[in-house]
Image (cartoon, helix red, strand yellow):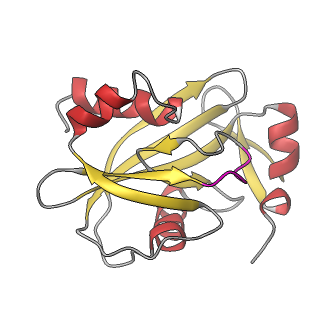
Amino acid sequence: MEQPDSEIVQIVDRDNREIAAVSRRIMREQRLIHRASYILVFNDQDELFVQQRTMNKDIYPGYLDVAAGGVVLARESYEESAGRELLEELGISDVTLEPCFDHFYEDANNRVWGRVFRCRHNGPFILQPEEVQDGAFMPVKRVLAMSEGENFTPDGIEILQRLRIERQV
């Protein structure tokens, strides 16, 4: 498996136009705007799969996360990234990805244009040990309530709140 720091990722400007391709390490060090895919996985009871990130993640280590996904590599589409990440992180390859919206997120450590997808899968999952420590399905209301006091990835929570406002969950 390729080392995450050496992955070449797509860099974009504030308008989501491609401007460069650099290593993941440089992207993080320089806080460059990049692309990412976010895939929210729901079961047949409309519960959301929430995963616990491993402590070796380069951003938000150990946090809870409402989405599978990750950075878009150079010369990769959002859709290709979403399919690759879903297979790598959760072992899912047999689902239809439903695009929801594109979303810009920015904080002190992360600037990202993400394409948000949703899919339906009841498990079981094959969790990637380098990325996902654990996971469980939860009702969306419980996830949002938990996010008030627990460490969730802030970009993921912002996306989940937007999905709620737009009545997509």
Looking at the rendering, in which quadrant would you find the C terminus? Answer: top left
The residue at 48%/43% (across/down) is 64
Residue 70 colored in magenta in the image: no
Query: What is the count of numbered marks?
Result: 0
Q: At which x and y percent is residue 82?
A: 48, 61
Q: At which x and y percent is residue 167?
A: 17, 31
- Which of 147 and 3 lies nearest the eye of the viewer? 147
- Which of 53 and 93 lies nearest the eye of the viewer? 53
The residue at 45%/53% (across/down) is 51
For the stretch drawn in magenta, the main secondary structure is loop
Residue lying at the far left in this picture: please name it: 45
Q: At which x and y percent is residue 63?
A: 55, 41
Q: At which x and y percent is residue 50?
A: 38, 50
Q: Which residues are magenta?
A: 54-58
- Which of 4 and 79 lies nearest the eye of the viewer? 4
The residue at 78%/73% (across/down) is 2
Q: From what the image shows, is residue 30 above or below residue 131?
A: above
In the image: residue 156, left or right of residue 10: left
Looking at the rendering, in which quadrant would you find the N terminus? Answer: bottom right
Q: From what the image shows, is residue 15 above or below residue 24?
A: above
In the image: residue 4, left or right of residue 100: right
The residue at 73%/54% (across/down) is 56
Q: From what the image shows, is residue 63 above or below residue 107?
A: below
